[in-house]
Amino acid sequence: MGVILRNLQKQVPLRRARLRKDVETLRHILGIQKFDLGIVCVDNHRIQQINNIYRKKNVPTDVLSFPFYEDLRPGKMPLPLHRDEQNLGDIFLGVEYVMRQCQEESLDLHGTLTAVTAHGICHLLGYRHETEEEWTEMLQRENYILSEYNRLTGRSLEPLMKRCSQDR
């Protein structure tokens, strides 16, 4: 199973090979290598359109996730019955939006995209942050994922949820 990574934006230079490698590391940490995963990198205009259609929020954002298993409970793995069900879903990364955040906060773009992708994968795995309890549970999961990622890669990423808590 694999990762399909498409870059549909031209505003921000993107090293897809690095992002793909980082996503593969995240998949290894979570034990989800047998599942397909789609990642689509888009600009502010496109992520705003998608956000408006699906969430009724007419603003750009950093990440939108569309899970294949919509009723998955956090911490539970999908149990596909057929090969065509070995799909976690799709993640849209608002690369232009993320780049602006990075410029404002002096963050590394590719590291931030990895952290944002980890957040998106958590959503595909049933995690939400609509209540304080869900928020805490998802933050704990992201902390675990990124601490393992840091241990394996020598990097020092942390969840962006800490900085974005008012944005639930």
Image (tube, rainbow, N blue to C red):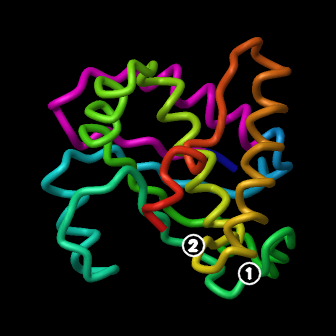
Question: Is label 1 in a helix, a strand or a loop?
Answer: loop
Q: Is 1 placed above or below 81 here?
A: above
> Which residue is tagged 2?
67
Q: Which residues are magenta?
A: 3-27
Q: Residue furthest front?
A: 166
Q: Which quadrant holds residue 99?
A: top left
Measured Cα–Cα span from mark 2 to mark 1: 9 Å
| Residue sitting nearer the eye, 53 or 99 | 99
Of marks 2 and 1, which one's residue comes earlier in the chain?
2
* Dot 1 amino acid type: Leu
Q: Residue at label 1?
A: 72
| Residue 11 in the figure: left or right of residue 149 | left
Along the viewing direction, whichever of 115 and 69 lies nearer the viewer: 115
Categorize mark 1 by other alpha carbons within 10 Å: few (<14), some (14-19), many (20+).
some
Above or below for 60 versus 80: above
Determine which of the numbered discs, if any, sits on residue 146 in the image.
Answer: none
x then y, percent, for residue 67? 57, 72
| Whole-percent x, y for residue 89 in the image | 56, 66
The quarter holding residue 8 reads top left
Q: Residue at x 39, y 55 (%)?
A: 92
What's the residue at 20%, 39% (across, down)? Answer: 9
- Marks 2 and 1 in Cβ contact (< 8 Å): yes
Q: Secondary structure at mark 2?
A: strand
Is residue 25 highlighted in magenta? Answer: yes
How far from the left and from the top, in percent, is residue 56?
Answer: 26, 82
Is residue 1 positioned above or below 111 on the image? below
Crowd around label 2: few <14 · some 14–19 · many ≥20 (10 Å): many
